[in-house]
Image: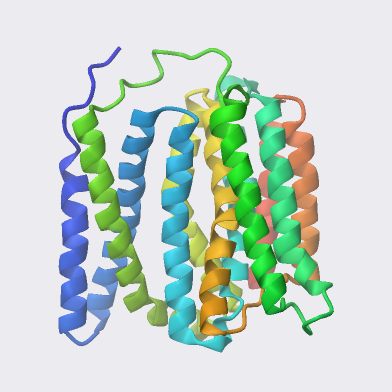
Amino acid sequence: MTAPATALPRWTIAAPFVAWIVLGIAYAVPGNGLLLALIGVALCAAVFTAVHHAEVVAHRVGEPFGTLVLAVAVTVIEVALIVSVMLTSGPEKAGLARDTVFAAVMIVCNGIVGICLLVGGIRHREQDFQSRGAAAALAVLASLSVLTLVMPNYTTTSAGPLLSSSQLAFAGVSSLVLYGVFVFVQTVRHRDYFLAGVPDEDVHAAPPSIGVALAAGGLLVVCLVAVVLLAKVLSPVVETAVKNAGAPPAVVGIIIAALVLLPEGLAAVRAARADRLQNSLNLALGSALASIGLTIPTVAAVFLWTAQPLILGIDGKETVLLMLTLIVGTLTLSSGRTTILQGAVHLSLFAAYLFLSFAP
């Protein structure tokens, strides 16, 4: 076994402070093309660094708590980006939370899962995982996604894909409670459902020391705050670029979700390539669950407090994609074994989602 890590990589220590320096320059100097590009690079670096530090903490606490740490860290970033853009833009961005959450579900359940199954199948032909844990996660995901993204289209208290204040409060509380029960099952009551059957000591590096984990936790907080403030500065530019390109407004949500999920997606693909598909599915499905179970309650609370409208209902085309994703996901995760075929099917659904987002 490899000796425990005694230090963090230098770039993970420097990146948060560089991000704060760039942020200070952004507030002191009027915006120009070069500065905006620098802010974009600093934002991406801060996101990647935050996820790296979350991975260090996750490795120290072990599975399945580790994937929970990652999911919560990613969701904090996602919520920060959503709220900063929505509060800056006003009522015209009332659907951004819906677009981002739906994009996260599609990216995770079809994009990340599809790539993991394809890469793992190419390298290892067949891969095993705990079907009980995957089925439990998918059941919660189906309930959360339908109740928060589809049901608003069929309520009658408020016209359109909107929820009344009481309905929005109920949606937020019920999402949080259901996610909390899932976390309890994952980490306490039925931990064995989410653990690989036979641990492979040659695959896993030794956990970092307590000091390294604490340092990573502190730097994680620094990164998350930098991400929030950088996103607030950059969000008007992203909206203008999407509008000038003639792309639908929902593309802003796809950009936010993709930026937040990219580092964690890469970690999931690496795990699948190393024949640790259980870890990949824990990361992927945990991110999708946290995206709804934590984002919706937080955004609901913010917009109930500010009395701004919040559009949650997706349209008919997106509803069909969501239902098809849940059905295919159920079939994929029911056997406990996967091949490249399942990966190809999920990636075809992801390609359809991207194409129809730009050509609705």
- Visible in this render: residue 114? no
**Residue 73 as seen in the image, left or right of residue 292:** left
Residue 150: percent from the left, percent from the top?
A: 77, 65
Towards the viewer: 123 or 138: 138
Q: Height in image: 337 above or below 75?
A: above
Residue 131 placement: quadrant: top right
The residue at the point 70 percent across, 36 percent down is: 136
Q: State the quadrant of the N terminus.
A: top left
All told, the count of numbered labels is 0
**Residue 270 as seen in the image, left or right of residue 152:** left
The residue at the point 52 percent across, 30 percent down is: 279
The residue at the point 28 percent across, 76 percent down is: 36
Residue 202: percent from the left, percent from the top?
A: 39, 13
Q: What's the colour scheme?
A: rainbow
**Residue 228 as seen in the image, left or right of residue 6:** right
Q: Height in image: 343 above or below 207?
A: below
- Visible in this render: residue 268? yes
Towards the viewer: 175 or 280: 175
Q: State the quadrant of the C terminus.
A: bottom right
Residue 93: percent from the left, percent from the top?
A: 55, 82
**Residue 358 as seen in the image, left or right of residue 44:** right
Q: Height in image: 241 above or below 213?
A: below
Residue 143: percent from the left, percent from the top?
A: 74, 51
